[in-house]
Each structure stands twice: as C-alpha cells, then as structure tokens.
Image: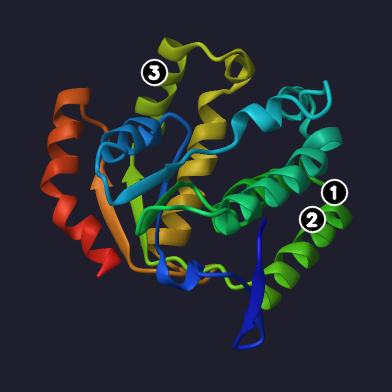
Amino acid sequence: MRRFFFLCGKLLRDGEDRKAVICVEGNIASGKTTCLEYFSKTSSIEVLTEPISKWRDVRGHNPLALMYQDPQRWGITLQTYVQLTMLDRHLSAVAAPVRMMERSLFSAKYIFVENLFRSGKMPEVDYAVLSEWFDWITANICIPVDLIVYLQTSPQTCHERLKQRCREEEKVIPLEYLESIHQLYEEWLIRRSSWPVPAPVLVIPADHNLQRMLHQYEENRAKILAASL
C-alpha cells in the first residue's frame, strides 16, 4: 500500500527521499534499453523501463499506434496517458538504493509534447491543457532527479537502428521525426536554452556498436553511481 507525506509543501512518497534517481534520456533507438540492461546487473540499481506495454494496450486500445498514425487527433490522448504512467514510474516503490529510469516526466513534456506542438500536429488548446497538468504536477509533487544520462546519438544512426528492430508502431517513423526529437534534446540538455534541467547531465556519445557502448558504460560506471552518494 502506497503511503505519501508532504515535504516542503510537495507530495512525496514515503521513504523515496532516500533513493537516488538517474534518468536515461535519448532519442528513439539511441540505446536506452541496452544501457538499462547493462546497469540492471548492478545490485544497488533497480531499473524502471518506459511502460510501453501500457501505451500499447489501454483496455484494448493502442494509443501509441494511433498517435503515430494520426498525431493531431490522438496526440493528447497518448501524451495524457504518458504523463500519468511516467508519474507513476517516478512515484513507484523501489527496493534498491538507486532508481534508474528510462526517460522521465520531464522529457515527456519538453521533448515529445513540445515536438507535437511545434510541428503543428497538436492544437494549441491541447498543448495548453497538457502544460497545465505538467505545471500542477511539478509544483505539487516532489519529483527528484539526481543525474541525467544523455545518450547522444545522431538521427541517422537512430533511423538505421529502427529499421533493424522492426517494432510495429515504429515502421511509420521518418528520419525527419528523429531529427526533430534530436534537436529538442540538444536544446534542452546541451544548449539549455528553453526549459530547466532538473539535474546534472552526463553526456555519453552513443553512435557506436554494442561492444563499444558496453565499454563506455563501464568507463562511466563510477560517475553514474556517484549520483547515489
């Protein structure tokens, strides 16, 4: 049973102030799953992947596929549910000292909602409603992040990886979409020109093959685990 209390005027899950939070961010097919799988073998880290299975099946409906097919109609439907499920990930109980999450509530808003709006595929009223929800959540619920690991990958590399993994919903994703997501990530985490960054950022170049990426994760292990100290 979940218990909550208030700290500094914000709702906080009981005991979660003692857990370090690391968010792994990056474009679609940037290698987040590989990164999470690598660190899942570390006893002090509990990994929480994106709840994609939930986005594919909401009482028999697939809002993820619907959004890719018709973003103007279904964008707010998916993103409202993404906001809810990512908030649940942030507040869920973990046993290990460190919580490592795939993306975050922040990238859901700053990257994916923002991309829908800027591309003209989300009406202004939908964007306003989602922004009001996000602002209320971040003002009233404590969502600490201790480190952001940014897997910096070229859109071209991501596009090639998408072709190889062949997820049904991703077959309709063009290179232009990945370029837009990349630019928003760079704007947020590198140039820091549009939105607040909730934690220090560790940038890991991620255009390399699997063996090189595993080596890079090992090289950066100490920096990543330092977020829990």
Helix, strand or loop under label 2 = helix
Image colouring: rainbow
Residue 175 visible in the shown view = yes
Residue 209 in view in this figure: no
At x 60% / y 36%, what residue is drawn?
Answer: 51
What residue sits right under mark 1 in the picture?
Answer: 123
Task: State the mark number for residue 127.
Answer: 2
Q: Amino acid at mark 1?
A: Pro
What amino acid is labelled 2 in the image? Tyr
The mark found on residue 9 in the picture is: none
Is label 1 in a helix, a strand or a loop?
loop
- 3D distance between C-alphas at marks 3 and 1: 31 Å
| Residue projecting furthest to the bottom | 8
Nearer the N terminus, badge 2 or badge 3?
2
Point out residue 80 in the picture as x, y percentages from the top left corner: 77, 48
**Residue toward you, 60 or 129:** 60
Q: Which quadrant is home to the C terminus? A: bottom left
Residue for point 75% across, 22% down: 69
